[in-house]
Amino acid sequence: MISERDWQDAQLLWDYQQMHHEPRPCSVGIGLGSHDLGVADTTVDLYRRGMMPLIVFTGATSRTTQERMPRGEAEHYRDRALELGVPTDAILVEPHARNTGQNITLSRALLKEHGIDVSSVLLVSKPYEERRAYATARKLWPEVDFVSASTSMKLSEYVESIQDVNLVIDMLAGSLQRLLIYPAQGFMISQDVPTEVTSAYRRLASRGFTSRLTVKDYPSAVDSHII
């Protein structure tokens, strides 16, 4: 059962993940594949607003999407964009990436293959992964200017859309853990993480919201990597 403290801690993690970037025109938009078709919808909305001339959808499948998106996340995102009226020649598909790092490196390679000059990227992710995606992209493609974007919604609205509050909190904890441990492993740039956010993460992990952690045993899942 979700307690009021759990919900407050989840809200802290949700708020921290928001980068609060103002969308602006970029060379290309990259929609990061996931279970959430809202990423495709938001990418299309930004395209319609003239924020980029070209979209890259990137992603294979995962344990979360293999049944819902059997042809791959990027392919299903592409289908969604076509349904919403985006022309075929405005979409590139990168169908092999299985993590955020590969989303960036394989999209970069695809754009180079097509001769696309990239100076800026509008990076579209799930709302609770804006900061993680940004930190990864800055590490792996440092010469490019990244602007983060996601569907504008409250945590309560996102939980309602997913219909699984435990899963959402698990994913919030997993995203925060990666922000803490991945910089030392060379996967992303370091971010300043406020004490109240790490404390919220520690409480959630201790309460059992650990299914999306890379280190799942408590207390090492909480204490071994705090920086």
Image: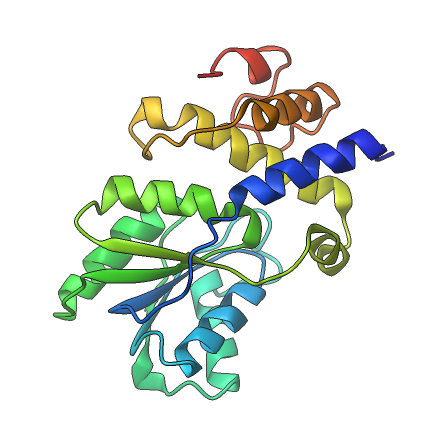
As drawn, 16 above or below 57? above
The residue lying at 44 percent from left, 69 percent from top is: 75
196 relative to 142 in the view: left or right: right
As drawn, 226 above or below 51? above
| Residue 37 shows up from this direction | no
Picture coordinates of residue 78, whole percent (x, y): 44, 74
Instruction: Say which quadrant the C terminus sits in.
Output: top left
As drawn, 80 above or below 145? below
4 relative to 118 in the view: left or right: right
Picture coordinates of residue 83, whole percent (x, y): 52, 85
Picture coordinates of residue 4, whole percent (x, y): 84, 34
| Residue 224 shows up from this direction | yes
Instruction: Say which quadrant the N terminus sits in.
Output: top right
The residue lying at 34 percent from left, 41 percent from top is: 136
The residue lying at 55 percent from left, 40 percent from top is: 16
Quadrant in the rendering for residue 204: top right
Q: How many numbered discs sit on the rendered protein?
A: 0
Picture coordinates of residue 96, whole percent (x, y): 35, 55
Q: Nearer the viewer, residue 56 or 225?
A: 225
The residue lying at 60 percent from left, 21 percent from top is: 216
Q: Nearer the viewer, residue 190 or 113?
A: 190
As drawn, 46 above or below 196? below
163 relative to 153 in the view: left or right: right
